[in-house]
Amino acid sequence: MRRVDPLALLAVALGAVALLRPAGLGDGGEVAWTRWPAALACALGFLAVAGWSSLRRGGGTASDLAISAGAWLGAVATWAPLRSDLSLGVRAPGLWLLLGAAVLLAWRGLGLLASAAEHGRVPAFLAPALFGLWVVQLWQCLVVGSGVPEVLLPSPARIAVTLAGSADVLWADFRQTFLKSVVAGYLAGSGAGFVTAIAVDRSPFLQRGLLPLGTLAGAVPIVGIAPIMVMWFGFDWQSKAAVIMVMTFFPMLVNALAGLNAPGDAERDLMRSYGAGYLQTLLRLRLPSSLPFVFNALKINSTLALIGGIVAEFFGTPIVGMGFRISAEVGRMNLGMVWATIVVAAVSGSALYGALALVERRLTFWHSSYRR
């Protein structure tokens, strides 16, 4: 006997009630779903998939994908009312009930896809990617359907239009902040932290004298050093790179030291039994063992560097840069441009983090965290 899935069954119930309720309020009164045949067809398709999925437990790639696709039919059905000139908000109970039903079915579908990814039946990125698309879809529906002013929170569609229309300005900001300030400061700070970690590991004097100073540098707030760096190095990217260097130095120093001390006594005794000196032990044992710790610091610094570069531009910069753009457009109440800049920064930081993760996986494939 088949067991009924309560989540999918609740989605069916909400979807059925949604089609009996108005999808908005027009000039002539309540507007029913029959006004949009395509939206009604998507809603009926959603009900069919939800009813079918309530009698299945998933477990197959095709059925998992079908349930997720059925949830999108419910979301697609809401687009026509949202794009029409209607009074929505609380006056569109059908719209919100159908959207809620689609979210319930999507929750079940994404859970099945995540379980399938653990067993290698679907790509690992599929469930997170669909979840991100659902967040954007809900953002669009809630902002447009509730009539939120763009000055408070623009819709994703509005942000996409701004991205397309201001590509040249955003590229200039990206080049100033990321390709100049972030890259230079990130490489300098991470490199200095790694070299200092090796020096501290070699010298007991530096362990007692330099390491506390490194801890002090890591505790300095960015809002305190950014104006000082601007006074020292000027308003261009060099001062931002200096701020990023200070921010990324300490995480690399601490993680690299931990990695150099990761090999146990047995491994070190084995190297000594072969007559290996300090340099040979460092190159053949300690540095390879420290790679997971070093990459951990690099990934942490990839986000710190971008944050530091943007915040440092609030305290003085030429009329270009992500931080300058955010500060200037907030003053003009142009939130679409602000969010477009945030999107560029988020994508840039995620791309850098992902690239580091791929390199880490190639170089530290032997680590226990990558072995099934």
Image (spheres, rainbow, N blue to C red):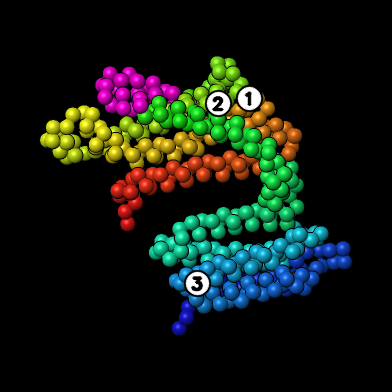
Give the class, few, some or many, for how many residues have Cα within 10 Å of label 2's Cα (few <14, many ≥20): many
Residue position for label 1? 317
Is mark 1 in CB contact (under 8 Å) with mark 2?
yes
Q: Position of residue 325 (x, y in %)?
A: 67, 33
Give the class, few, some or many, for how many residues have Cα within 10 Å of label 3's Cα (few <14, many ≥20): few
Q: Tell me which corner region of the image, top left, top right, bottom left or bottom right, holds residue 93.
A: bottom right
Instruction: Answer whether residue 210 is magenta in the image.
Output: yes
Instruction: Answer whether residue 334 is magenta in the image.
Output: no
Residue position for label 2? 240
Q: Tell me which corner region of the image, top left, top right, bottom left or bottom right, holds residue 47.
A: bottom right
Region of the chain picked out in magenta, as a range: 195-219
Q: Position of residue 72 (x, y in %)?
A: 61, 65
If the image is split into quadrants, where does the N terminus sit?
Answer: bottom left
Q: Position of residue 295 (x, y in %)?
A: 39, 39
Is mark 3 in CB contact (under 8 Å) with mark 1?
no
What residue occupies the far left of the structure in this picture? 273
* Left or right: where 140 falls relative to 195: right
* Left or right: where 247 falls relative to 278: right
* Left or right: where 83 falls relative to 181: right
| Residue at 55% across, 41% down | 348
| Residue at 74% across, 37% down | 333
Which mark is drawn over residue 62?
A: 3
Observer-nearest residue: 13 or 294?
294
Specify whether residue 287 is in view. Answer: yes
SS of the residue under disc 1: loop
Q: Amino acid at mark 3?
A: Ala
Specify whether residue 323 is in view. Answer: no
Per the picture, the main secondary structure of the magenta-coloured stretch is helix
